[in-house]
Amino acid sequence: MSVRWRVVAAASALTVLGLTVPAVPAHAANPIVTAVYTADPAPLVVGNTLYVYAGRDEAPTGTNAFVMREWRVLSSTDAATWTDHGPRATVGTFGWAGADAWASEVEPRNGRYYWYTSVNGRGAGWMDIGVAVGDSPLGPFTDAKGGPLISDSTPNSSGLNIDPTVFTDDDGQAYIYWGGYWGARAAKLKPNMIELDGPVLTPQGLTNFWEAPWMFKRNGLYYMMYAANDTTGCVTDSNYACQRYATATNPLGPWTHRGVVLDRVSSTTNHAGVVEFNGQWYIVYHNANAPGGGNFRRSVAVDRLFFNADGTMQKVVQTTTGPPPNPGGGNPGGPPAGTNLAPSATASTSYVSAWENLSAINNGGVPANSADRSNLAYGNWPQQGTQWVEYTWPSARSVNRTAAYWFDDGQGIDLPASCQVQYWTGSAYAPVPGQSTCGVAADTYNVTTFTTVSTTRLRLVFTARAGYSTGLLEWLAYQP
Ligand code: FUB
């Protein structure tokens, strides 16, 4: 399948800041917008729409500094095809500010949308955090406070007051985290969302925090993702950054560092947000991949994010295709819904070619088609006949279906002729009971259902077509 270029029919003219600006159709690929450079994305789901709030990089080629004066809104109803709604707030929204429309995030409350922004105030010090408010996700937005919410004069503020992330817990308490230059900070917000409620705290456990925090909650666990630039597992050049993350059972921590979720991107800065939309988790981040792009000419990208059964996050596979369309009511093009146990298993096989990768089958990649090896591929050329791959867990897992995405390289590796799912009974391998057809179709997840088995080992046995070898791009194993 070629890169999916699909144009949105979104031509209605919109009045923005006194100007008439058309909603710009975008395409389904990464970066998601290429007509302008965009950075520091912050996702927000409202109804059936995924919004992304982003700054605009205006630096001319060769300018090695941020030139940022406005924040734009992008939207999608399937996470794949995007519309750029143009600038919805600017430095001028804040009468007390003069430059640097850096990272921002929008938080809804009581039908209003509070847009927390990093912006350079005209007063003492450098960056401040302002807050604008609007009655819809697209605004119009006006200054909600008439001055900074956080500045250098805020007691215990960060060495660089940028990159706000605002999170509202189930009990209605809102929190703001922010900071740069290794100085993470946290505070409660009052219900009016424009005043801090209590002292500024220094959160504990955000190992190697550099900037760009993003907070969210999943299954009762709090997650803090943030940019780090250490050379101890993050990047090899500290001019670049990765996204680390930590979890906590309290919104103010202490946090437990969990690892790297997003490796270095092609721009030096690394700024990301996480959101669940139509049953799928996504990471929205920026890189320098648009034509003519660079460290100060960045572009927003979107990819899928997958969690392991224990709540840890799988490392993001950065794609050029972006995610498959997800208009809701299912997940066309993507893996079947459910808890996939494959990432927590150890894979083994009867044979893997030296230049292929067994890790492909449980690395969470989402193939665009059976020839897509962008997330690695398992293949067993030049072996023919019957081969197998197997998952082993340290203790028994309940499993009742699998999904195989077959690899076909158009050369020596072809779709198999047949397959069967087997499990370890404790003393031997046996076909899983009540097994539905083990599919061998191209360009799709072939789901095989069966009566739940509790086992430490699950095996996929497949027989090649005459004269060919076989391969897999993904093999998913689901708990009931
Ligand atoms: O875009 C300006 C700054 O660069 C942001 O505030 C940081 O997070 C980094 O992405």
Image (cartoon, rainbow, N blue to C red):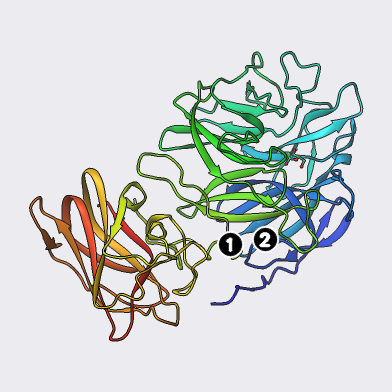
**Which x, y percent locates residue 69?**
86, 45
Determine crowd level at label 1: few under 14, some 14-19, many 20+ residues with C-alpha closer than 10 A.
Answer: many
Q: Residue furthest left?
A: 427
Residue type highlighted by circle 2? Ile
Q: Which residue is drawn at 69% across and 62% down?
A: 83
Residue toward you, 401 or 326: 401
Q: Is residue 109 left or right of residue 92?
A: left
Q: Is mark 2 on a helix, strand or loop?
A: loop
Q: Name the residue under label 1.
A: 322
Q: In this view, does 270 lie to the left or right of 460?
A: right
Q: Quadrant of residue 428?
A: bottom left
Task: Please tell me whether residue 280 is drawn above or below residue 42 in the rendered image.
Answer: below
Q: Residue at x 60, y 53 (%)?
A: 50
Q: What element carries label 1?
A: loop
Which one is earlier in the sequence, the residue at label 1 or at label 2? 2
Locate ligand 1 by image quadrant.
Answer: top right
Q: Are marks 1 and 2 in contact (CB under 8 Å)?
A: yes
Q: Disc 1 beta carbon < 8 A from ligand 1?
A: no
Residue toward you, 221 or 346: 346
**Which x, y percent locates residue 221?**
44, 32
Q: In which quarter of the image is residue 356?
A: bottom left
**Which x, y percent locates residue 214?**
60, 37
Residue toward you, 305 or 372: 372
Determine crowd level at label 2: few under 14, some 14-19, many 20+ residues with C-alpha closer than 10 A.
Answer: many
* CA–CA distance in space, label 1 to label 2: 8 Å
Residue type highlighted by circle 1? Gly
Q: Name the residue under label 2.
A: 32
